[in-house]
Image: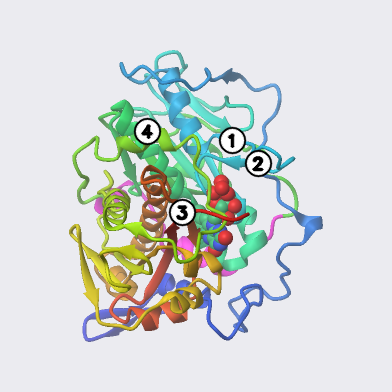
Amino acid sequence: MFTWVLSEGILLENEAVLYHELTAYSRDRHWLKPISDERILRGFRPLSQGRRPWPDKRYDAALDRVSLPAPAAAATAGLDLAVLSRLLNDSAGMRTAAGRGELRFRAASSAGNRHPIESYVCARGITGLPDGVWHYDAAAHRLVLVGPAPRGECAALLLTGVPWRTCWRYAERGYRHLWWDAGSQIANLSVVADHLRVPATVRLGFADADAAALVGAETPWELPLVAVTLGRGEPALEASGPAEPGDLGPDHTSFPLIDMVHDATTLADSAAARAWTRAIGGGPSGTTSSLVPFIAGRRSAGRFVAGAHTGAGQLHQVLDLAAAELHWDGDVDVDLHVIVHTVRGIAPGLYRWHEGTLQRVPADIGPHDAYELAVRQDPARDAAFVLLLSCDLRRLVAGRGARAYRAVQLAAGVVVGRAYLAAAAAGLGCRALTFNDDVLARMLPASPAGLLLAAVGVPGGKD
Ligand SMILES: Cc1cc2nc3c(=O)[nH]c(=O)nc-3n(C[C@H](O)[C@H](O)[C@H](O)COP(=O)(O)O)c2cc1C
């Protein structure tokens, strides 16, 4: 275990901070080049074609399967198969882009199109579906029965992450990606749940080992990330018997640094889970339901028309919806800043988004800085504005504990996931972007731990 260092009553370091710093991108190195540190896995070569991970988890053909109805403009009278079908399709469902051959895309965005998230339904009282633990087979839009009826009062979804699927490309930084991608899926899910009036609550307050046992996830190859309860009462997250382990494919590599941060942010038992869940926050329901029509056609903008202006109203619309409160147990402070390039009526520069208003940050920041920030990717320079998510990580984990690390990464994914939909609603395009941690820390010294970026602008040009 990494040693905690106490100074003036503030915990200065823990495993989450250490992980974050060791997976930082900086100006000095290419993203594929690992830093030299004994805690980074030696000799790992990313993107090895011979070791390409399976895109999904597979199960024995003899297990019970239930086809989900085609997702329709679902009825809203309680939780039934039609509603479940819509929730799963619109958050984790598969779509194949025309003319892209075998490339499979999904409802929510995922860095590098890796899609490392698996979704399980912990069914209790869902009309038309026997109680049990079901795995969502996105490619066939059906459920596979993998475990006996869970104990609890209301149905829940449990999302897990398969590190190898994304670490194959991003190495140790892939642990961040698990949370971002889960957040992007939760963004869609919460929008649809809002629309269908399903009371959905996002929870990080569960004992990790219990959740893993419930769905047959074997640590460290598959990690429980986040639960979403669908209804009221105690969520059905307690196993009543063993679950099928399934098959994630051969030849996974594990990364000691990821094991370290995941262990350090784990809740050991239900008492620790209750202690985490201090309160369920969240705004009035219905806030984001207007985004539903934009899920079906969501995709990342390839390029933006450099110099093209958006209106100030469009920027406010995107930020209001992206930053809308989430109904969840992770009350953590994530800061949202915006670099404005070309928005009519708003001077170019850096702003903090605070309680629905833009506050100018006195710093000379322009398109070239945004380009450097986004690891020299054109969309950050050509967009009309760029969202920056960050936090004061040391202070946060000192106050809320190491699990807050999961919460901030997830929250960043949710904001960016909503930004995609809100941008489409405003007639604009969006692309999530990774970033250079160094550049971000210098740009935002009071909130120096970078989380994620999203570029928003007038889409144009080719992918
Ligand atoms: C967390 C996250 C980070 C991403 N980072 C980048 C990036 O740095 N550069 C980029 O061009 N696209 C980035 N993307 C966009 C993905 O490449 C894109 O979502 C994926 O290729 C699937 O395409 P789709 O969004 O059109 O479904 C990111 C997406 C997510 C969710």
The three-letter amino acid code for the residue at tag 4 is Val
Expressed as whole percent of the image width and height from the top left, the position of residue 141 reads: 58, 27
Q: Is label 3 within 8 A of ligand 1 (CB to nearest ligand atom)?
A: no
The answer to which quarter of the image holds residue 186 is top left
Mark pair 2, 1: CA separation: 7 Å
Ligand 1 image position (quadrant): bottom right
Give the residue pinned by disc 2: 104
Instruction: Judge the density around disc 2: few (<14), some (14-19), many (≥20) Cα neighbours within 10 Å.
Output: some
Between tags 4 and 3, which lies in front? 3
Expressed as whole percent of the image width and height from the top left, the position of residue 210 reads: 44, 43
Sooner in the amino-acid sequence: mark 4 or mark 2: 2
Q: Can residue 255 be seen in this view?
A: no
At numbered mark 2, what does the secondary structure look like: helix, strand or loop? loop
Mark pair 3, 1: CA separation: 20 Å
Question: Tag on residue 362?
Answer: none
Q: Is label 1 within 8 A of ligand 1 (CB to nearest ligand atom)?
A: no
Give the residue pinned by disc 3: 430
Q: CB under 8 Å between callouts 2 and 1?
A: yes
The three-letter amino acid code for the residue at tag 1 is Met
Mark pair 1, 4: CA separation: 16 Å
Establish if 302 lies above or below 119: below
Give the residue pinned by disc 1: 94
Establish if 12 lies above or below 323: below
Sooner in the amino-acid sequence: mark 2 or mark 1: 1
Question: Tag on residue 192?
Answer: 4
Q: CB under 8 Å between callouts 1 and 4?
A: no
> Which span of residues is magenta-colored?
252-276
Establish if 217 lies above or below 459: above
Q: Nearer the viewer, residue 462 or 144?
A: 462
At numbered mark 3, what does the secondary structure look like: helix, strand or loop? strand
Expressed as whole percent of the image width and height from the top left, the position of residue 173 reads: 55, 67
